[in-house]
Image: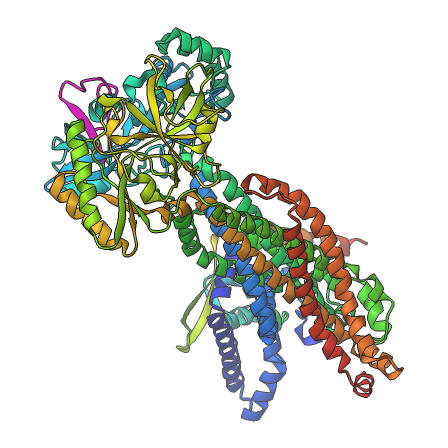
Amino acid sequence: MREGWHEFLLRTKALLRRRRLHREMAEELAFHQEMLRARYAREGMRETEMETEVRRRFGNAARWQERLRELWQLRWIENFLRDVRFAMRLLMKSPGFTAVALLTLALGVGANTTVFSMINGLLLRPLPVPESDRLAVVGITGHGPQTAYSFPEPLFRGLERRHDVFSTVFAFSHADLQVLARDGNEKVVGQFVSGGFFPALETAPLLGRTLTEADDRRGGNPAGFGAVISEDFWRNWFGKDPAVVGRKLTIDQAVFTVVGVMPERFVGADPLDRPSVWIPLATEPILNGQRNMTDSGIHGWWLRVMGRMGPGIRLEQANAAVAAATAAVVDENAGDPEWAAAQLKQHLEFTVERGSAGFTYLRLQFRKPLVAVFAMCCGILLLACLNLTSLLMARGAARERELATRLAVGASRGRLTQQLLTESLLIAAGGTTLGLAAAPQLSHALGAMLLSGPRESHLDSSLDVRVFAFAALIAVTATLVIGLAPALRATSRELNEQIKSGQHAVRQQERHRWLPQILMSVEVALALVLVVGAGLLASSLVRLYRSGAGFDPRGVENIGFSMDKAGLSHEQLMEFYQEAGAGLRQAPRVTAVSFARVVPMTGLTWDNDMFAAGQHPGTDVHVNSVSPGYFVAMRIPVLEGRDFRWNETAAEGMKIVLNEKAARALFPKGSAMGRTVNVNEGRKKAPIPCEVIGIVGDAKYEDLRSDPPPTGYMAMTQESTDQYSPSFNAVVRTGGDAGSVGSAARRLARQLAPGVPAPVMTSMTTIIDDSLSAERMMAMLSVFFAACALLVTAIGLYGTLAYATARRTSEIGIRMALGAQRAQVVGLVCGQNALVAVLGTVAGLMAALLASKALSSFLYGTGTRDPWVLAGSIAALAIIASAASLLPALRASRISPMMAIRCD
Amino acid sequence: MGKRDEPGDLIQGTLEMLVLKALARGPLHGYGVAEWIEQTSQQALKVEEGALYPALHRLELRGLLKAEWGASENNRRAKFYRVTAEGRKRLEAESQRWARLSAAVGFVMQAS
């Protein structure tokens, strides 16, 4: 064993220093000869005699030097290197084939790696904290159709106190903070975290300490409110001041003390959120004032809850324990027995899931699209592999005489297989490397496309061990898939029979060569599935855009003013907005300015229960609070009645504008104009009667996908500011440059409200595009993949047919000599591919019908069996297949019979 | 494989044992090993170069010998072989085996 190991080590060393080894061998032998000559000279031999004697003794020096070399060789590596050199030469000789092989494979691998690295970043990568596998996410079932991951504060506190199976239960929530800098407030991403957050994540701070339970109390630690900052924030805000602990930070007008700095790698429990400041959960009422979530108790669902499981506790145990504790926690903490009883009756129950990768909402949103895209990528990779298999097989057929001869002179089948596999390994390795090289840029671009939205997200899709392992797995699988079948086939015994039977004449075996045909049919089927999928997704996206929003998004800019923490009274606020509106209207080419609470298409909703007199139950109506001029700015038609006015106040009776749907729902009979709608704003408050003063056209609210909901527009001037955060967005319609509007808005904000963060401007079309990011990504990628699939299939069909036809040259020559017409030859050659195409199409169509069911949840306004899409896809494939077949067929028809027969 | 490449009168295992024995006295180059064996056996054993060098390299590969380049007696660069600890153990075992074997052969041949 030890000797064997020694041999291996020395041989490996020898491999690396082969030249030196050979030189030393020669030198050693030369020395020996030298010594012999010296001895012969001593014995008095003559010069010429001496040379003959030495030569006689040594025989052929080169030969036994070769024997020495063999001793030192690592057989398999030498063989492998020789194979690699041979395969390289072969690949270089057909650059077209090599380029196609490398590019198709790079495409498949690149696409797969890209999407996998995103899935890895979003779903798989564990949080960089110790023992992340002990973390768990707590959810709620029975509250809404799907598992919910939001908790109200009282229920979380109940779980936190109880913890039993968990060593710690903690909660966190995203917070947009305004931190006072030298010149006014700046927006900073923060997180409210409960006292258990840092202890559970077990990451030591860079400086100072982390937040603990003592900080997470109303009124804070006796020493004041503590805040932990990120390394990044420490660098940018405090210039890496080593004495940062103890410094003050004014956040939303409350003073916090920096107690610690977290290292760069610590991201918290949401892998996509990168907070700069962590502050205690208990300070939320202070920062958010009257409209805080903590005090809305069980009606404010805003916390993500996670826990660190106690030692030895398994996920199932934790799940069972938490589910069993649900009733007690809800009963004791809800503070509203009626509500608690109602929820428990609906089978509200806590659940526990794996939490090693933390929790992010985007995961819920993007899991399905990413998995669908990943499936497409696997499809394109499989297609690329099948294509290469067919091409290699066709090439192998062209090389079969060489291989059969080598088999006949005694090469082992294993050795030949190894050599052929080396070729596919080279292709696979090359393709994987190319694909891997392109993956980081691609996933960056894809991530930017997918996660562009109002809130910044940081998806770390960088290549890590998992991605590399995945790519390596792909490369190995691809090598085997690509190479094994052709290699085994090319070295099979059948071949021997073949050389015996002579070559280019018509042969019986040709009939049995069904494998390439099947492979190509599968490829065609796969391509059809991809094309159908792309067609469905793309036509769905087009329909979505065409469906219209009910307003005209082109030329509309939204400008968000962060006035919610400016501490202004209602009158002051209205004055601010009126002045800001007047100022914005002065900007060049602005045609209309108004304000709205909720910007449509951002996914935000605000709804209330409304009822007409005597109606029970009421109707769920989406609500927005808008300023006068909103309908003009958005180009929503006013069908009846009038718009709001700036001088309308709450005192003169509440007014409401309904859209058609709401009007019909609330007042099925007769006109809604002038009638009264009662708005339920909460269970404990009396309904507010509102007079309907206008009816407007239906417009979509949450996103482009959902139909316009019944909507009621309230007057911004009448809004009671104690209820909602009075921050509005300017809706500006402009005929030209958005930049001038933006700079006007910033100037106005500086003038009218110094100290408030700079307003943020987004165009309505961008908002719509962002709201469809998943759909857009899927449609764009699927169309791209489908185009690639068509191209690859065309290459495959062309390549295999061209090889096959080339091998039938003499047969065709004989046929033509016997009187076959050119058209018949074209038919003969095309017929081969026609069969493949028809078989593939039928199989593909069936597969597509099955597979497209998986897409149905992504489709808008179209079924999975859209006949136009199906017909179009088949037509596209038919065109591709004919084009790919015609070229070899035409070439075959130009064969000169004399030449063909003679050359055999 | 030609006849000249055969290890002469010596079977392979025996040659390796002799090489180890030759080197047990101290480092030698290949020529020195051959010379020592020939002289010590009083020219009875002839060591062919075609067998000697593969044997030396095989022993080196197995870690029983260690090779170093040094200056020869006529001041030329030569490859010197030295027995390792592992090699000494092997030599010990081989010489015992050889003693048993030759004694056994002797008994058989002396039987009447």
Q: Main secondary structure of the magenta part?
A: loop
Q: Quadrant of the C terminus of chain A?
A: bottom right
What residue is drawn where x is 11% and y is 33%? A247
> Front-most of A781 and A275?
A781
Q: Is residue A59 left or right of residue A565?
A: right
| Chosen colour scheme | rainbow
**Residue A230 lies in what quarter of the image?**
top left
Q: Residue A99 location in percent, x, y?
A: 56, 69
Percent position of residue A255, x then y: 13, 28
Q: A763 or B17: nearer the eye?
A: A763
**Depth check: A762 or A438 in front?**
A762
Q: Hey, which residue is sitting farthest left in the picture?
A: A182
Q: Is residue A837 left or right of residue A902?
A: left
Q: Is residue B97 above or below residue A356?
A: below
In the image, what residue occupies the spot 38% across and 41% down? A636
Q: Is residue A227 magenta?
A: yes
In the rendered structure, does residue A797 fall within the stretch colored magenta? no
Q: Residue at x 23, y 51 (%)?
A: A741
Please tell me whether residue A802 is drawn above or below residue B13 in the rendered image.
below
Residue A205 visible? The answer is yes
Q: How many marks?
A: 0
Q: Is residue A1 visible?
A: no
> Whole-percent x and y of residue A90?
61, 73
Residues rendered magenta in the picture? A208-229
Q: Locate residue A191, reporting x and y percent.
A: 28, 31
Q: Is residue A485 left or right of residue A238?
A: right
User: Quick one: A418 or A832, which is closer to the camera?
Assistant: A832
Tell me: residue A318, above or below residue A785.
Answer: above
